[in-house]
Amino acid sequence: MDNEKNTNLHPGKINAGNLKKVKFYLCPACGNILTSVGESEISCCGSKLDALAAKPADAGHEISVEEIEDDYYVSFAHEMKKEHYISFMAYVKDDRILIMKLYPEQDGEVRFTRMDGGKIYYACNRHGLFSSSADGKKI
C-alpha cells in the first residue's frame, strides 16, 4: 500500500493508539460511557454528545489511592445517591483503559490492576469529569 492510500485510511494518524489523549462521553439519558482518541461525532439515545472536559479534583471530588497487593485501591467520600453520584472511574495508560462503571448506593471504592505511569479519570453525574494523579503520586 502506498503512503497516499495509507494516509487516507488513517486521517487521525497523529493520535492513533495514544490513549493519553482519550476523550470521554457520557450519555445523560442511559449512562452509556463512550471513548475516542481522535476527533469524533458521538451520539447516544438520539442526542449528540460533547466530550467531557477533565478538570482537577475540587473539595467535593477528591480521591485517595493506596497500593494494595498488585492493585490500586481508589476510594472517595462523594455521595452515591440516585440524584448525585460518581458514574464511572477510568484508569488510563498510554496503551490501555480500565473502566469501572459505578452505580447509586454502591460503596465509594474501586480497585484497578496497577500499571505504572497512568492517570485516573472519574465523572460526577452533576459536576462533570475530573482527573487526578492521586495527590501528586504518579500512578
Image (tube, rainbow, N blue to C red):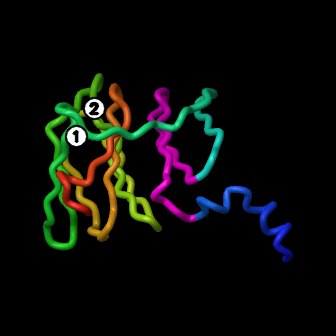
Q: Residue at x 60, y 51 (%)?
A: 38
In the rendered view, tell whether residue 77 sits above or below residue 36.
above
Q: Which mark is residue 85?
A: 2
Seen in the picture, residue 95 relative to 43 is either above or below; the reply is: below
Circle 2 — which element? loop
Can residue 1 be seen here? yes
The stretch drawn in magenta includes residue 33: yes
| Mark 2 vs 1: CB contact within 8 A | yes
Residue under the image location 17 percent in, 55 percent down: 65
Is 91 contained in the magenta span? no
- The residue at the point 86 percent across, 75 percent down is 2
Q: Local crowd at mark 1 within 10 Å, few (<14), some, or many (≥20)?
A: few
Q: Position of residue 60 (x, y in %)?
A: 19, 31
Q: Quadrant of the N terminus?
A: bottom right
The image quadrant that residue 98 belongs to is: bottom left
Task: Specify the quadrant that holds the C terminus.
Answer: bottom left
Q: Which mark is residue 44?
A: none
Which residue is the site of mark 1?
A: 106
Q: Amino acid at mark 2?
A: Tyr
Task: Give the residue at x 22% y 40%.
Answer: 106
In the visual, does 88 lie left or right of 111? right
User: In this picture, which residue range is highlighted in magenta?
Assistant: 17-37
